[in-house]
Amino acid sequence: MVRSPYCLWTITIGMGIVEGMKLTLDRQRDMQLYRQIAEQIRELIRSGALPAGCRLPTVRQLAGDHGLTRLTVQSAYTELQTQGLIESFVGRGTFVAEHAQTLPAPAIPTLAALRQSPVEPAAWHSQGVLAELVRMTEQPDLLSFAQAIPAPETYPTREFGRALRTALEQPDALSYGPIQGEVELREQVSRVLLERGLAASPESVLITSGAQQGIDLVLRALAVPGGVILTEEPVYPGILELASAHGQQVIGLPMDDGGLALAAVEAACIAYRPRLLYSVPTFQNPTGLSLAPERRAALLALARTYGLLIAEDDVYGLLAYDEAAPLPLKAQDAADRVVYITSFSKVLAPGLRLGALVASPERLPALAAAKQSSDLICSPLLQRALALYLRRGHFAAHLQQVRALYRERRDALLAALDRYLPECAYIHPAGGLCLWVTLPEGLDESDFCREAIERGVGVARGQAFFSQPQRRGYLRLSFGAHTPSQIEHGARLLGDLLRDHQRRQTLVRARAGLTARPLV
Amino acid sequence: MVRSPYCLWTITIGMGIVEGMKLTLDRQRDMQLYRQIAEQIRELIRSGALPAGCRLPTVRQLAGDHGLTRLTVQSAYTELQTQGLIESFVGRGTFVAEHAQTLPAPAIPTLAALRQSPVEPAAWHSQGVLAELVRMTEQPDLLSFAQAIPAPETYPTREFGRALRTALEQPDALSYGPIQGEVELREQVSRVLLERGLAASPESVLITSGAQQGIDLVLRALAVPGGVILTEEPVYPGILELASAHGQQVIGLPMDDGGLALAAVEAACIAYRPRLLYSVPTFQNPTGLSLAPERRAALLALARTYGLLIAEDDVYGLLAYDEAAPLPLKAQDAADRVVYITSFSKVLAPGLRLGALVASPERLPALAAAKQSSDLICSPLLQRALALYLRRGHFAAHLQQVRALYRERRDALLAALDRYLPECAYIHPAGGLCLWVTLPEGLDESDFCREAIERGVGVARGQAFFSQPQRRGYLRLSFGAHTPSQIEHGARLLGDLLRDHQRRQTLVRARAGLTARPLV
């Protein structure tokens, strides 16, 4: 949308009444003035009265004209920025954000709320999620779309077995090895990353026990105790539990079709002065969205301006199905703002528990020290076997195979959703293993997920991917581990369940009109 | 030593002068009164004026008789107790500790010092240690006694290779598995622990990436942020770095021939209200000392009284050479005060990166959550292969073999030390892989270690095992990875170096008398 030159609006504060825009500020109210302003501008944006691209008055104007302090107006604008509703551009002014109307309800706690009451550890939602995961393990015949796992039939059992045998011929494969990782594996990782468009020397690579440990090491080594971590939201649940374990406050930021909303990142940088952004900019888990290529340089510039470190989780970057994946942020990281995290779990086999970090020589020693404190080293035996597997050139063919397989499975799921769940909205994932579904308004997510399991289909409930409770229901469906016919079967069962739910809702409403007594 | 009925001593405070015992208290001095009292009693103990077993006046007596508050006297006593110099027994009184004269200089910061200035992270000493470790890796022909590693020739390459092949026949060995660990490995760990005298059900076992991760998980899940951790001192350096990474303050407590001095534990419980004691009660690293069997129940009672949780690291428990190892603390842990940590690194092969925790059903969920946050799971492939290896009954024979081998190597090192380093004191280790050497007074440990490496012998410098700088020089020699003739050769080189050092010292002293100018 093209920005309109200037919105014609005036705010005048007389006896606490804002005229013209029908805003009402009441100095007697319990709510602070800045929050009243923010609340009412938010409503004007949501209702469409202030359209996307419309320019807002400057802080100075609004404050000067109407007898408010600049701090009051700035605080209102900061809150709106943090929620991704307005955008500020140095030298140009403040605008209603392009996607303001379509953004989900703000999941970002206000500055005031954050300062007053540190959010409880993520335990509040993990109970329900955990109970479901347990239920799923206890049901052996379950057709589960809940976990983002690769197709087990693609695991390179034979070639890896051969590599293991060769590795075991050197007896020190069972001994301790270097903290940073076996040099032959770091060399091979470096080659794989070059395929991904990232030139990273073996010296800049640190071997980890998968991406989860990579994230943990970044938090251990580079986050500030009691600090704030920005992320996309919805987000990989691992970071929510981990941040809470490290006493870190997660601030989830909204996304649109182009990935993370940069205005929200900047606003959050101003409001919270965070040290760290955890981001999955390519085929994000759970949404499948990627940060648009043109936003990547802008995000790096923001990181530079605000001293933000980006933990770039790229575990799905090699799984592109439609066109080439965007280059990693780390590939353009001239100002050393990025620690790159990857893993062989999604692209090869999770049971290897091997992944890697890429960091600058300045950051690597602290990360290696964190690795040593955590578990000393990764198994040299597995590292050397993986290095051999990679050196023998099996990986390129493997990647080709799994990309074709997952593309087919994704397409099968998209077709099945069109057929059996047309009431749901969903995002077309151009890569990765996850598909994000928005349930019809008013449908209870937790009932739906529980009953889906009872009918033999496992799904990941959307709530697991948010730091705060959501009113709307979502699902994450992972399509990597099932054949097209299993996918079709599962989607049909979900569609049946959905319609049963809707039928019951209609029934309750109909009965309510006839027989219910008033709630007095 | 038999306790004498009561020491004849009197303290009278007149004009700030303590008579009789020649103590001088000065209310004008910068040093607080309680510290003046503690300092002077300490000197009386060290000089032998107050012999071991001698009873001190009660707090009430000393305070009442001499116009001091009870808090002042209690604080002085607490400081002395924390330093292991005096012992308190409920209903019997306070006594000069049995080993007070022979204890190393107190490494325990005073209560006041601790509260005023939180100790810097252990970085201050790790620089030198790290530099040495790097130097050792860069010297390929080095005969290194520095790392507590097993004998590589004992690694079960063949049997483990076979087990790996079988495990790979199930393709889900390369998939994700349960956070707590593969059930077949937990069953086998349970059987191994029974051999160690510990009845632990598979349900109480959590598989870890070695003992280091076990310790990390206990700190993550069960320590209080910013809290105090008690340990023996000298101690495994891993806990020093780890505690500092977790913002925990380590308080090192003295040991004697019977292991950890319980009076010091109790005093530290009173003074610091710690939540956690990290202890290696059997064949401790680095000293080789074990907590005497009769102290074990008493330590558990202390833990109960003071709400102390014990992280019992038993990685050397299966490596006993003279007689059966004492039973683990966990074996008598009726009140659930112990989380038990073990590993296959020292007894089988470190490259497996597999160990285990044993904890009660109340504590296990938090530990499993910490495991999930850290790195999700251990490799199911390695877990299943180890389970197979254990189930096929190879481990008993392996243990017999390594015990015989390490006994022979320990004896070779003891004999070589007697022959080549008679100037040093050392502790006879009844198990484990480490031997603790006290260098002659005045010898510079860091010069000695650096020059030893230059002459081709790697040793671990004592400083790495202390939380605070020490005046005295120590070495840790690990004897597991070398043949008796290599051990003999290494000890001879160390002996030559020691005598060169002493010759140089004598030379400097001799020259000083003849040619040095006064330092004015």
Image (cartoon, coloured by chain):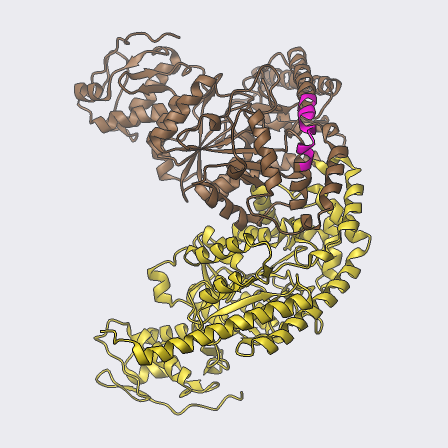
Chain colours: A brown, B yellow
Residue pictured at 26% horizontal, 75% vertical: B517
Q: At which x and y percent is residue A294?
A: 44, 17
B174 shown above or below B475: above
In the drawing, does residue B127 fall left or right of residue B33?
right
Q: Position of residue B153 (x, y in %)?
A: 72, 57
| Left or right: B157, with B424 as reference point | right
Using residue A505 as the reference point, say whether residue A265 is left or right of it: left
Residue B439 in view of the camera = no
Q: Which residue is painted at 27% across and 9% down in the image?
A: A6
Looking at the picture, tell me which residue is in the foreground, B512 or B207.
B512
Residue found at the far right of this picture: B392
Q: What kind of secondary structure does the magenta stretch mostly adopt?
A: helix
Q: Give yes or no for residue A389 being in the magenta stretch.
A: yes
Magenta residue check for A320: no
Where B445 sits versus A479, above or below? below
Residue B282 in percent (x, y) is at 62, 67
Q: Is residue B310 visible?
A: yes
For residue A517, which quarter of the picture?
A: top right
Tell me how many marks there are.
0
Q: Quadrant of residue B329?
A: bottom right
Most foreground residue, A105 or B442:
B442
Q: Quadrant of the C terminus of chain B?
A: bottom left
Q: Nearer the viewer, residue B304 or B160?
A: B160
Q: Is residue B301 above or below residue A389?
A: below
Looking at the picture, how far across and down is residue A479, in whole percent? 66, 23
Residue span colored magenta = A388-401
Point 31% across, 80% down: residue: B514
